[in-house]
Image (cartoon, rainbow, N blue to C red):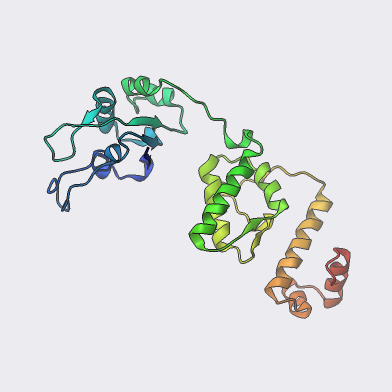
Amino acid sequence: APLVYTNCSSIPDSLFESELFGHEKGAFTGAGALKKGRVEQAENGTLILDEITEMPYELQAKILNFIQEKSFYRVGGNRQIAVSTRIIALSNRNMQEEVSRGRFRKDLYYRLNVVHVQVPPLKDRGEDVLVLAEYFMSNFKTKYGKTKTLSADADNLLKQYSWPGNVRELKNVLERVYILSESDVIESSDIRFESGEVPEINGDLKSLLNDFEKKVIIRSLAENGGNRTQTAEKLGISLRNLQYKLSRYDLVD
């Protein structure tokens, strides 16, 4: 059975009806051929409407009518089309609040709210963060043709962060670091969060600073092809000081 995903926040208002219900040839300028919409593509399957609260208010009535009648009209069409399509609506907003503020239709809310599943925020789902991270990393491997992995420190950082943007933020953060990281192993120092929030820190300041210094030295050595003189110059320390730190952090071959 088909599973058709639609992110309502990514569709311009002017194209919304055509995207959902399709259009007939010549329905409007640029409609050179008949196009089936997402509702029709999901026939005998499931249509996922993500961020449904972003759907234009005037179009909500047409979705409500489709749910009630199991039929619709394409844009520019005069023939009623009947399909059997299951609707799953998702939102990261409080939909009851959206209804009370007049931004979402009350009748549509109650038609959709037959089976309500409250998904806890990502920060409350423990190891789910790493399961999702592994899933996204596998997808990026296929998408970009490169194999990269997360270090243990990176895994810990992902678990400590609060993820105010939930799964989308996790995907965006990982995809950005997947593209920008030059190493096949992504370290915690490579990761930049969208909110700028500092994750919860475990450990005393001295050990954290030592860990950071070690990672900076490792990265600088890699960038300078292992040349210690160039690395020392870049870090602004003497070669003797660098050699001491290499020995201290057990980085000597």
Residue at 26 percent across and 28 percent down: it is 66
Does residue 165 appear in the picture of this structure? no
Residue at 41 percent across and 36 percent down: it is 51
Does residue 216 appear in the picture of this structure? yes
Against 171, residue 234 (above or below) is below
| Residue 42 at x, y percent in the picture | 32, 38
Q: Quadrant location of the N terminus?
A: top left
Q: Quadrant of residue 115?
A: top left
Q: Is residue 77 left or right of residue 203?
A: left
| Residue 143 at x, y percent in the picture | 49, 58
Q: Quadrant of residue 190?
A: bottom right
User: Closest to the observer: 248 or 235?
Assistant: 248
Counting labels gives 0
Residue at 57 percent across and 30 percent down: it is 120
User: Closest to the observer: 232 or 2?
Assistant: 2
| Residue 19 at x, y percent in the picture | 27, 43
Q: Is residue 151 left or right of residue 4?
A: right
Q: Is residue 59 left or right of residue 212?
A: left
Q: Quadrant location of the C terminus?
A: bottom right
Residue at 85 percent across and 67 percent down: it is 245
| Residue 57 at x, y percent in the picture | 29, 31
